[in-house]
Amino acid sequence: MGSIVVDVMLKPEILDPQGQAVAGALPRLGFDGFTDVRQGKRFVLTVDGDVTDEHLAAAQEAAEKLLSNPVIEDVVSVHVLEQDSAEQDSAESDAAASEDGEQ
Amino acid sequence: MRVGVVTFPGSLDDRDAARAVRECGGEAVPLWHGDDDLKGVDAVILPGGFSYGDYLRCGAIARFAPVMDALVPAAQGGLPVLGICNGFQVLTESHLLPGALIRNDHRKFNCVDQRLVVENASTAWTSDFEAGQEITIVLKNGEGGFVADEKTLDMLEGEGRVVFRYVPDAEGRNPNGSYRHIAGITNERGNVVGLMPHPEHAVEEGYGPSLDGRGFFTSIIKQTLESAATA
């Protein structure tokens, strides 16, 4: 059983009131160093067996058709979720690094 | 004159919309989200509420309901469709109307009597108004901020497709952060109209801030009768 992660973010030019609410709450907890917060959505799509290229392509299509609204949101990443939880952490930081590269 | 009113799971104002149709002399026909059957109606209203709990994005899941498989091509073919509040969100998610609705910029839920200017009185749903007329109807939403890119906004304004604009307050603000104070828009053909405020809550003496909502329903009833007469 494999899983695919789809990350969706509001486009940079679209106002993010939820992110602003979070940004407003952080200083009240003593977190003063964050100048902005943007809130996005993560979907985890699970399939039978290992994730194939077909699964990834279908996930990409689903991401564009249903999981995001292209008028206001970007699909920033579609990638395989590593099964092992230790690997998951490193895979996600890798993914975060590669996302920067993709943009 | 038969006006269909769609009920999705979580629709809230379907009965009020049906009542408004009847109050204004039409026959209201209930349509069910799970049936891809428009029952031969002359026009359709997508009502307000919280279809599918507003999960994912407002209107995003309703857009793929079986009734929409019938409604989208019918609307593209000229069937008059009015989307109110959540119905407007469904119309943008369906790409029958451009742009999108996002959370109010001030992050609070609105429930106010709202002044609007009717900018386009030639759509299927606004012909009983006059361009420039000011009306007051109810506005109640948490995610009513109309957004679109500059090119789309220019196109909507250039083609006269901004149907309603909020009258801004003394500080120049509108109630939900909508770009260019846009409260409602139409498609190229003028048969599909979406707006955040609720005309169905302003059709009866003693309920709501005015009777200004009646114009939406009398417009469509007259237009459908006229097109039946010339058919």
Image (cartoon, rainbow, N blue to C red):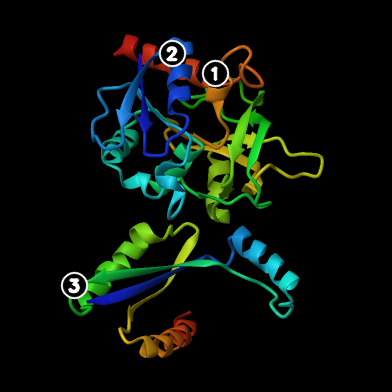
Quadrant of res A59: bottom left
Residue type pointed to by label 3 = Asp
Residue bearing the label numbered 2: B22
Q: Which of marks 1 and 3 is in front?
A: 3
Q: Percent x, y for residue A71?
A: 47, 57
Q: Percent x, y for residue A40?
A: 51, 67
Residue type pointed to by label 2 = Arg
Residue bearing the label numbered 1: B215
B56 vs B137, left or right, is left
Q: Mark 2 lies on which chain?
A: B
Residue bearing the label numbered 3: A48
x 44%, y 24%: residue: B15
Q: Which chain carries label 3?
A: A
The disc, 1 or 2, on the residue closer to the chain's N-terminal end is 2
Distance from label 2 to label 3 (Cα)?
Answer: 52 Å
Distance from label 1 to label 3 (Cα)?
Answer: 55 Å
Query: Can you say which quadrant of the picture contains the N terminus of chain B?
Result: top left
